[in-house]
Image: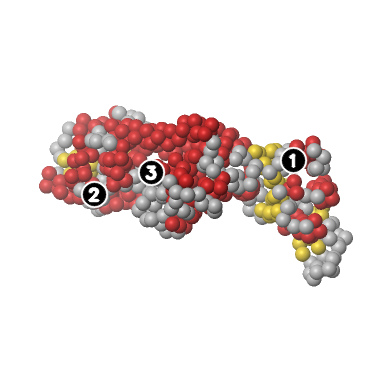
Amino acid sequence: MKGLRVLIVDDEPLMRLSMLDALEGVGCEVAAAATGTEGVTILGTRQFDVVITDLRLPGADGLTILKVCKERSATTEVILITAHASVDTAVGAIKLGAYDYITKPFQMDELLLIVERVGKIIGLRRENLELKEVLEDRFSFGGIHGCHQHMRALLERLKVVAATESSVSIVGERGTGKELVAHTIHLNSPRRDQPLIKIGCGDLPERLLEAELFGHEKGAFPGALRQRRGRFELAHKGTLLLDDIDALSPHAQKQVWQVLQERKCVRLGGREPLEIDVRILCASQQDLREAVAQGRFLPDLGDYLTTVQLVVPPLRERRDDVLVIAEHLLETSATTLHKSLKGFSQSSRDLLMRYSFPGNVQELKRMVDRAVASGRNGEPLQPWDLCGFQTCPFLGGAPQPTCGFCTEGLVEKSEKVEMTTLATLAAAREAFERDYILAVLQQVDGSRTSAAALLGLSRKALWDKCKRYGISSTKCEAEEGEE
């Protein structure tokens, strides 16, 4: 109980002083108030872990103290002191959020025992929150999710690189999320309040690409009916993402390098150089250093752009991320479509873990979006929701030519050993959840109400998990009976 912040609100001086001495004796930081009004005032100035209040008080009563506590801090636990005649009121207060009550007269050891139990819950709650923050910090950043060792390494580098002004080359197959990585870098950089401008270098013919990059004056070429600012100019003070940069022609590469060297840009058909201050991010499927070695990319520009290089691995090389990403996408898509779904069925999870995902995260996103759209509220998503067909080879039917699972196929047999091992990670996570719930229940003497509060779940959600994992508790069953 050492360090626990406690507020005592009691109008009996001797009782108030006795509780204060007892709690300070076990290491609590204690404040005291003689009236309910004084207690409310103190609550407005300080944060407390525990409030011990008499039910009947001059000014604001104990229920008012309870209400104020919960409005200002849902994590503050309230213990009520009541006479036998007011026990019914105290029980009602527990339904309103009070942790417990104690009836007069009582031994100080009784109160200390209750406070000790509260202290354990608060300690576990803090540990749970810290663990959650650590896991979120470790396995996601800027909307990028992953628990595979390669993704964890990428996320750690992202956090460092984003805060710099270095140019960054992002390498990865189509659909791996290179653009998301670029957005994450920009939004966590010193230039976050300035624009992020993107251009696809492989989307336009060379002449039009030059006009898009550098802008043009009116009449610079046939069809140039007005002046237009280029992407370099639009990205001034911000960030410019050059997607598919390996598609730049040799001439365009020289022009881009000249702009980056001189930090000036001239619109097509113009004469006045414009000051350019941009951070360059580029994305490509091929390592630019390989393109330089093959003579397809300007060495000086290649060296400049690869000051920092980030490689985004394909989804097939980090299968233990598949379900992590899929569950995040399901939650996002279900929220957008206002649907309530019970995750993925086990057969769907197995199917996702067996598929090679040639389209990477983009393909997974399309698949989940389709599944969420067709899935039934209150039910888990099934394999046919994912593929869009009721019959496929893996479902016992004929191949469907427009089904990705059929046309691209599942992973080869040689890969299934790895898949089986990785698939057990889901079971391992469930086992961890079961053990953690058991540990929390043990800490709170089997109270489902206290455990649910600690775990951040509703009582019903916790009860469902207990039934799912076969967790039985006499106190849990008693609480269920009360409901």
Upstream in the sequence, badge 1 or badge 2? 2
Q: Are marks 3 and 2 in contact (CB under 8 Å)?
A: no
Residue underneath mark 3: 47
Q: Is residue 139 visible?
A: no
Residue 432 position, x and y percent, is: 38, 33
Q: CA distance from mark 1 to mark 3?
A: 55 Å
Furthest-bottom residue in view? 225
Hey, which residue is sitting farthest front in the picture? 398
Q: Quick one: SS at disc 2?
A: helix
Which residue is at 73% across, 53% downward?
A: 202
Q: Is residue 386 above or below residue 101?
A: below
Query: x and y percent of residue 225 in the render?
Result: 80, 71
Residue plotted at (70% across, 38% down): 308
What residue did someone put label 1 on?
A: 288
- Does residue 282 appear to the left or right of 181 in the view shown? right
Tag 1–tag 3 contact (CB < 8 Å): no
The amino acid type of the residue labelled 1 equals: Leu
Q: Pointer 2: what residue?
A: 95
